[in-house]
Amino acid sequence: MAPKVTLHYFNLRGRGEPIRLLLSYTGQEWDDHRIEFSEWPAIKSTTPFGQLPYVDVEGRGQLAQTNSICRYLAKQHGLHGSNALEEAQIDALADNVADAGMGYGPYVRALLAKDEKKAKEAGDHFAGTLLKPFMDRWEKILLNNTSGQDYLVGGKPTWADFVLVQLLDETIRLKSDVLEPYPLLKALHGRVLNLKGVKDYLAQRQETPW
């Protein structure tokens, strides 16, 4: 049995949400510790790198960085590929999603500054322009998956699917029809969000700005 995990992150979806989705899917025991901005200065020095998210793994220690946490959980639950090449492909895809997500930053910074005009401009630019070349490639990767077109690597979910779907889900909030030109990505988005455990989590998830 996997040790209990406590996730520490702001009361936002953000970089913590792929971890929440993955934990919900695995069915393992976990706690969702949500931190308010007002609490952060007092907590910052106690975190591994002065950043969120991080997790406490019961009896074993702390782990930080979204992709490292997801990779650890995936290895605990068989969601990291069936061989060394698949593991590397999954890592590469997750890194590529992180690269794409860098373009989301100006939107978040504008929200934090309470600049609605700039937030709309940044969100439109991200969803309408910046993400397109990435989505073109991800659609092609699904199309060329020789194990079927249901998931990015192999024939079952891996942690790369969760990090990608979370980014797509945020993008849909900015541009509701963004996946219409990408039938395989659209299907992947729906498939992952309807997985057992994930669907239950989403049904009770509280709404946050991002």
Image (spheres, grey):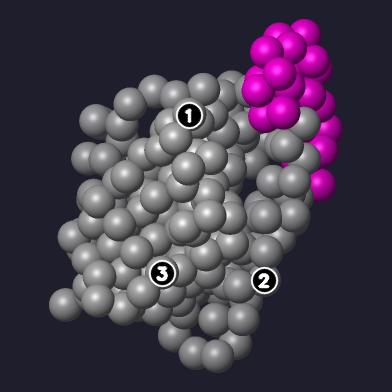
User: Up-down: is 164 above or below 173?
Assistant: below
Q: Residue furthest bottom?
A: 84
Q: What label does residue 92 carry, if any?
A: 2
Q: Is residue 208 left or right of residue 49?
A: left
Residue 151 visible in rendering: no
- Residue at 55 percent across and 90 percent down: it is 84
Distance, label 3 to label 1, CA atoms, is 23 Å
Residue that badge 3 annotates: 62
Where does the image place residue 54, in percent across and percent down from the top left? Answer: 46, 58
Distance, label 3 to label 2, CA atoms, is 24 Å
Residue type pointed to by label 2:
Ala
Residue that badge 1 annotates: 38
Magenta stretch, residue numbers: 107-133
Looking at marks 3 and 1 on the same chain, the residue that comes earlier in the sequence is marked by: 1
Please say whether residue 108 is one of the residues in the magenta stretch: yes
Looking at marks 2 and 1 on the same chain, the residue that comes earlier in the sequence is marked by: 1
Asked whether the residues under the numbered discs 3 and 2 touch, taking CB atoms below 8 Å apart as contact, a structural biologist would say no
2 or 1: mark nearer the eye: 1
Where does the image place residue 165, in percent across and percent down from the top left? Answer: 51, 47
